[in-house]
Structure formats: structure tokens, C-alpha cells
Image: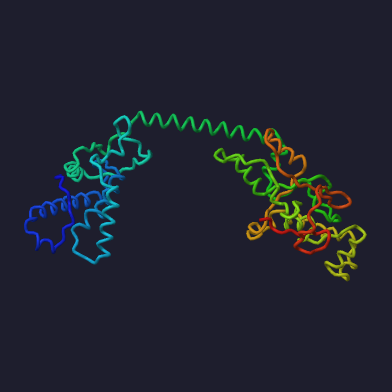
Amino acid sequence: MASVEITKITYPDLEREVLSYNLINIAALQFVERKRIYQLIVAPQTRKGFFVSKTWCNQYSKWFSQAVQPLMTRNGKKKKKKNSRRRISDAASVTPWQNVNADIVCEHGMLARACAQRAKRRVMEPGAWNLLHCFYPDSQAFAATTAECHKCVRAHSAQQDELQRQCHEVKIAREAEVEGNPLLKLVLSRRTGSPNHLFNRNPLELLPLLPGLYKLVSHEWLRSWRHYTRSHKATRPPPPDLSLFLCEAHQLPLIPPHLRQFLCNCHSSFPPSFPHLRVFLCQQIGFSVLMAVSFPSCKLVIGGIIKARERDSLLLALDQTEHQSQHVCEVVTEDEYDALLGLYPNEPTGLSVGFAISDHGIEWATAPCTSCDAGHLDQHFLGWRRHK
């Protein structure tokens, strides 16, 4: 293909520049040739023929539509002229190279793998390839039946095997951290946000958990840790830190609303103590009905209350809006919390917030902030405002 520089030639120039007749013919001939190449590369694929780089085809299409085709158009408005000049300048960076298949040639001079970077190709019919090769004789020909470079295939296979081996080792190591500790296994498989095995099934008790020591852990941190344990691609989260649950003014713990609701049984109604059981049930199902029923028959009512209470888990009662409007936490036992900190033996741990459940009620290790009470509820139900 003749290498003649194309200049901007319009139809009014033909009337004024008679001496440029030969240049105009050469420019028109070049345009016809390049348009023919464009038609070849946008034609549908065939099953038999020769490979051609998709990257080169895309570059040529952009170059032809932006730099070549506008040169043969008529005069337009000034704005169109500016846009045409801008397209031509932008197209300078996408000029097609002489070796059509340079992107699909591997380092060994053979056909590169189809999955390699910038190595996608399409099949062109033999007649179209022969014509394209006439315009770009430096192009290396690859028939559609050509096999990929066996050296590249073996190297890629070995690389994938090594990667799978490393991933398997990482997975085994992460699973070993959990499998060797039953407490971590419980936290890993937990979905309700609180220890199910310590759920208080006594309907005569107000608190949902059995007496013991408990700690708060961020739900986002636990979700990241669970994902890290199950996926070898996930990054290790930093040690747990509950600084988000501190008020800005006094640096004291603030009780999240969903935790306050869970500990105070706001979803379900429960009798506070055994002497008030009959009075409580009278308020729930009616005085006359309860008086006509013997006390053993109340077991059905109590059983229904227990099932309703089990559904009032710490996390399952939250909807999507509540998840987004507050910092969500989970409750773990003190031993489970120590097991989580044991995963970071050489790293400093952040602030911890805990509470104890006893016969006297709930006692916090650090008294929650009462000045930042946003709910103005009962003194046992401390409010919480979102820490920003």
C-alpha cells in the first residue's frame, strides 16, 4: 500500500486546485483500499480460514472511522470542522501496526494462548486473509487449525497448579485455626448474633441469656473474619475494636438499639417472676379464660412464648434499614472473645465492651454513657445514638 500522506481535501478544493488532480486520485485510491480492509475485518466470522487479532481489528475500525473516513466528507459548519480535527488528532494513537497478528504471537514466535492478555482472535476466510496480507505483508499467518504454543500451555498449567497448591495450603492453615478451637467453630457457624447454647429457655426469666460474662463484637468485623476463614482470597482483618461504640463526648460505651431491645425483650412479653405468672397470663389471654383452665394447661401457652422468644434473635429481627442506620454488634462469651484475640498474639488489641448477667440483672464492665441517652426511656433501657 502506497505511503502517501493524506491531507484534508474537500469538494470546493477540486474546483480551485486543478494541479492537485493526481494527489486527489491517490487519496481517493487509498480511501477505497482502506475502506475495503474495513469491510473485511467487520465481516462475520467463519469456521475455516486464518486467525486475525481482535485487538488489531478494533484499532483499525477506530482509526478508519475517526481519521480516514472524515477526510472524504464535504465541507460543513465550523463546529463540525473542529470535531473532525479533534477526531484526527485522537486517532493518531490508534494507528494500526504492520503486523496484524502481533498481539497473538507469543514470546516463542508461536500462536499465543487464547486466554492470554490481548490475545483474543477471530477467524477470517482465506480469501479475505490473502487480501489483507497483501496490504500488510509483515503479518504472521496462523491457520484456524493451528495449535497454541505448547511451551506456553505447559508453563501456564504449571503456574495454575502452583497457585492451586498455595491456595490449598492457605485454606488448610485457616481451617486449622478454627478446627483446633471449638469456641472459634461456634462463632464461625453462628448466624443469630448470640450464643444459642446459652439461650435462656426458662419463660419465668426476663433476660434472654443465661448468667455469665459476655462481650460485644462488631458484626462487620465478624463477617469479615468469617469470610477470611472460608475464602483463601480474602485479606486478614485487623484485631477486633469497638471504638465505634463509644460516644464522642465522654468516650463511654453506647448500647446499640438492637442489643438493648434484645436484652430487654422488647419483641416478646415475658413474665418477670413466678408469682406474677398468673397475672401476666391474664393480661395476655384474658382473665376469664385463664381462670377456667387448670395450671398444667398453661404449658401450651408457655411453650408458645418460648418459641416466640427463640425467634427474637439479636440479628434476625433486624431489617435492612436498621442494618444501615446503626452499628450492629454480636454477643459472644468471654471465652469466645479471648479465643478471637488469640488469633492476634503479637498485635495490640482495641477496646472491649462487656457485661455480666446475674440474678440481679445486667452489670456492664464499663458503665454506659447516660448523658448521651437519645431515647429518654426507662433508666434500665439506655438509649443510643449513632456514632459518626
Counting from the top left corner in percent of width and height, residue 291 is at 90, 67
Q: Position of residue 96 (x, y in %)?
A: 25, 45
Report whether 33 appears left or right of 218.
left
Query: In terms of depth relative to the viewer, which is nearer, 358 or 325?
Result: 325
Q: Which residue is at the front of the view, 28 or 152? A: 28
Coloration of the structure image: rainbow
Give me the residue at 79% from left, 59% from top.
371
Q: Position of residue 171 (x, y in %)?
A: 58, 35
Res. 307 in view: no
Compared with residue 41, is residue 376 higher up or lower down, i.e. above or below? below
The reply, left or right, for residue 125 in relation to residue 149 is left
Residue at the outermost bottom position: 288
Quadrant of res 84: bottom left
* Most distant residue in the right direction: 275
Q: Is residue 48 above or below residue 89?
A: above
- Quadrant the C terminus occupies: bottom right
Q: Can residue 379 be seen in this view?
A: yes
Q: Quadrant of the N terminus?
A: top left
